[in-house]
Image (tube, rainbow, N blue to C red):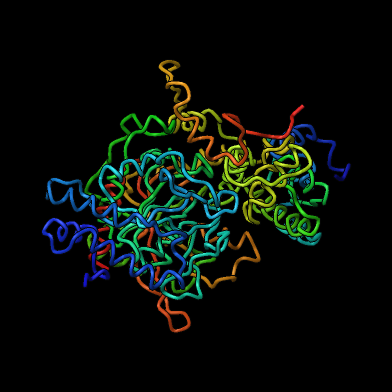
Amino acid sequence: MIDLENLTIKKAREHLVKKDFSSVELTEAYRNVIEEKNSAIHAYLEVFDDSIEQAKYADSVIHTKGDDSPLLTGIPLAIKDNILIEGKTASCASKMLSSYRASYDANVIEKLKKENAIFLGRTNMDEFAMGASNEHSAFGGAKNPHDIERVPGGSSGGSAAAVAMNGALGALGSDTGGSVRQPASFCGVVGLKPTYGKVSRSGLIAMASSLDQIGTFGKTVEDTQVLFEAIAGYDPMDSTSLNTPYPKPHTLNPKVIGVPYHVLKEGVDEDVFKNFTDSVKKLEKAGYEIKEIELPYVKYSLPVYYIIMPAESSTNLARFDGVRYGLREEGGNLFEDYAETRGIGFGEEVRRRILAGTYVLSHGYYDAYYTKAKEVRGRIKKELEDVYASGIDVIATPTSPTPAFKIGEKTGSPIQMYLADIFTVPANIAGIPALSVPSGFAVRDRKELPLGIQFMAGYGEENVLFEVGKRFEICN
Amino acid sequence: MNPKYTKNGTRTLLNHVQKRLAPDMCIVFLIPKKVGAICAKAYFFGVNCKRPYIGSTREGAFSYAVCYYYHMKAEDIEKLARLARISVKKSEQDALKKDVAAIVEYVSRIQEVSSETPETEERQHEHAFSQNVMREDREPHAAGVYTESLLRAAPRTEGNYIKVKKIL
């Protein structure tokens, strides 16, 4: 029996190279867990039937190359349902794309294939990555492995739940406003949103292009780092891919952590607040200097986000019209074909956001909303840049203002649901990297629900996040 | 607007407000500066204004309070749905109207941020952050190599064509 509970990518790698077990055995072990748990948790929308074949190939590579084989050879991973794997369904958990099969590999998938990683299956998500709870999946949301009456978070809730239930060693998700970090926090795993442009978006089904970024899930900071390093890099197929050297990390030995206590005054659960202040104390004990910081513009991040994101989504999702991909519903004429296809193919939240996006972009409102939001976005970026320039290495906040909430608790009010992203959105607005690391538990209904602490660093400074995250894992 | 307060500095004020707010989305109240913000707040809560934003003009003798006011109508949702090419059932209209209005009201708080700092700084920042990249316009791939795989994704095809209803 392989001890999946305590296995990490790094340990699995050692075992594979030492031939303690093969990738086929490891992949089978994960497939067994999925078979046992997925009907209750619904982390996977589909388990690929060729994963054992992939593992056989990985084993042959390890057999011939041993320790010289790529680091992720034979490592079983879960992939969010909005990332293209050639020939496989990529549905975005939407009726619109339930029959769509990817015509090509996403850049990150190409890279993982070169590493001989194993794709176990595609994971559940909020439809088109729009949501913070997985309840907007057209195929029924994933559940939180720590309490199946609660949500796993979203939108990459399936990927977080897959890792948390020991149904994969690591996973890919996408993070537009917190969709990797918030579910990581709810499910008790580590989640990284990289710097905008560090990971190619080619082959990620677009939601809001100036905010989307593919991120990684793992059980440890090191695992998210290994996955990130495997998928990062310039790609000419993504016009926003970073090619120019970004400002170098101003420090590789981070010492100063900034805490914006003023943003924690309202709407933060008591247990979350206490856990966060305890975590900050632990970091102080571990040798970090803690400084209180003021971020006067950051409170506008969420309203800015809910203008820019629906605006970009409404344009990106215009491509789903029943002509080139997926669903086609017939109407009396071409216009009705479009409207029927989109009316039936898109779920409630997607339609809501497309209409809100259409509103803020429409004549007469464009300047008051979209142009204004872009301007405020610039100020938020500048404000964060100034903080890092002033000698703060990392900003810490709770990842989410509450622990995982009950299924159905927030579906009545879109705004309440949106507030779940209040601490994660600023990193997307500013394009900076951020990491969520498990920080303890809150007890609800006699169940332990995981909490997370979020670290945000300056542009291109993932290394600083990994360094602080690893130190936090030790001192926690 | 109370005409009593619009004689002095009106144009400055109106320009100021118009630059920041779309028409028909708010009620603007003018307050002589001497009344002071505290009184103004109390007064506007008195007229059942949920989140008045109290601002002031640079010149002129007036402060102003902006009370966001939304009255999304069924026709508004129909119009948005038409623009977005989404059919909306009559039974869904009320819920959508309520939700979209709530989103718009929520995001309107960005109007509180004054536009008075130079825009160029923000623009420069935007440019440093993302730039447009174009493919060289040469060496195209061989004709037809992707045709089959792309057509396979289309719901209706005929031969090497995607099939749609007549356009003209």
Quadrant where the C terminus of chain A is found in the figure: bottom left
Identify whether A37 is placed above or below A126.
below
Depth order, front residue of B165/B73: B165
Q: Residue at x 48, y 49 (%)?
A: A90
Whether A475 is drawn above or below A396: the answer is below
**Residue placed most toward the observer, A392 or B136:** B136
- The number of callouts visible is 0
Q: Position of residue A95 (x, y in %)?
A: 59, 53
Q: Position of residue A207 (x, y in %)?
A: 53, 45
Residue located at (33% from left, 41% from top) = A110
Question: Residue pushed farthest bottom?
Answer: A446
Quarter-of-image position of residue B9: top right
Q: Residue furthest right?
A: B3
Q: Is residue B94 left or right of residue B54?
A: right
**Image coordinates for residue A463, horizontal then vertical, percent:** 27, 47
Q: Position of residue B66 (x, y in %)?
A: 73, 48
Q: Is residue A472 above or below residue A306?
A: below
B10 or A89: nearer the eye?
A: A89
Q: Could you tell me if residue A256 is visible in this image?
A: no
Give the residue at the far top of this rendering.
B138
Instruction: State the residue in front, A330 or A168.
Output: A330
A421 left or right, relative to B48? left
